[in-house]
Image (tube, rainbow, N blue to C red):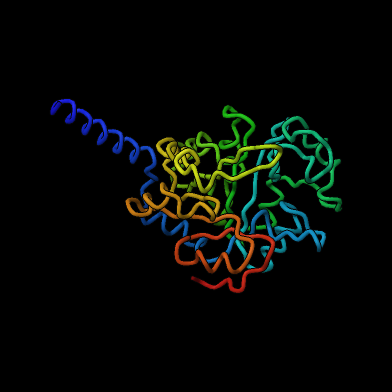
Amino acid sequence: MIIAFSIAIVLIVLIIMAYLWCIKPGKINEDIKTKIEPFTKTYIAHRGLFDKKLGIPENSIPAFKRAVQNGYGIELDVRLTKDGKMVVFHDPNIKRMCGSDVRVCDLTFEELEKYRLDETDCQIPLFSEVLKVIDGKVPVIIEIKSEKDSEPTAPVLNKKLEGYRGNYCIESFDALQIKWYRFNRPDVVRGILVNQYKYRKKGKVKSEYKHKHLIKLNLLMFNFISRPDFIAHDYKMTNTFTLRLMRKIFRFYSAAWTIKNQETMDEFSDIMDIFIFDSFIPESKSER
């Protein structure tokens, strides 16, 4: 009985140690602190400072120009076309924004140029065009989108950023894209994106947020692959078990998305380091 109990205790300790090793983020050194500081000192406009009422679509050149003019940092999404061009677009399919049921990865950039964003004159921009607009004036968070794990989005992005002098960091839901940066560009600040799992029942989407924290946060167990410098998550997940545990044990930066009103921003102002917002204009852009 004593031996069995001792073995059980050892196994429990090993499981706990393995769990902590899996969720452990990267080490925060002085270089990382310096590079991430610009993102903590300004609010980050989600997909640019877009406004549908003003005819400014998300992830469009006008949205990025407007963010720069107002001094906000920028969060944007990059993915590859069929012919390997890097464009700024969120969805894998262009139906929501352009009305046609076709995937970005199935179109060449020349074919993609024929479409317009959200019934405006705006086109889906090349990443290189967007970089010229931002021109280092504000910090930019670049989310890597990929259709499949083997897609070489990370190295293509790295090539596109050669010579860019502005502040930037990268993030992705795909741990393998972040892994590439970990081993090939450890000097670049990297983050992992985490979302709530959802399930469908009778045609309705329901959140599992209140009931299945461990299942929902299993993605953080892949931190051993990417060892991220920051965790970017739905602000509603802030007080889940794994994130509370990580905040007590490890040092890492937290990015909250997507904040849609001042009340929510104020509520999490003492907990989160980086705020990604849309649908409103924050009251203050000053240092927190």
Decide if residue 244 is on the left or right side of residue 78. left
| Residue 182 seen in the current view | no
Residue at coordinates 25% horizontally, 36% vertically from top-left?
13
Residue 166 rendering spot, x and y as whole percentages: 57, 56
Residue 200 rendering spot, x and y as whole percentages: 65, 37
Q: How many marks?
A: 0
Residue 5, quarter of the rendered image: top left
Q: Residue furthest left?
A: 2
Residue 276 rendering spot, x and y as whole percentages: 59, 58
In this rendered view, identify the residue nearer to me: 7 or 65.
7
Residue 281, quarter of the rendered image: bottom right
Residue at coordinates 58% horizontally, 71% vertically from top-left?
285
Decide if residue 132 is on the left or right side of residue 168. right
In this rendered view, identify the residue nearer to me: 234 or 164.
234
Q: Is residue 204 above or below residue 38?
A: above
Residue at coordinates 37% horizontally, 43% vertically from top-left?
24
Residue 201 rendering spot, x and y as whole percentages: 65, 37
| Residue 242 seen in the current view | yes
Quadrant holding the N terminus: top left
In this rendered view, identify the residue nearer to me: 68 or 50.
50
Q: Is residue 153 above or below residue 259?
A: above
Residue 6, quarter of the rendered image: top left
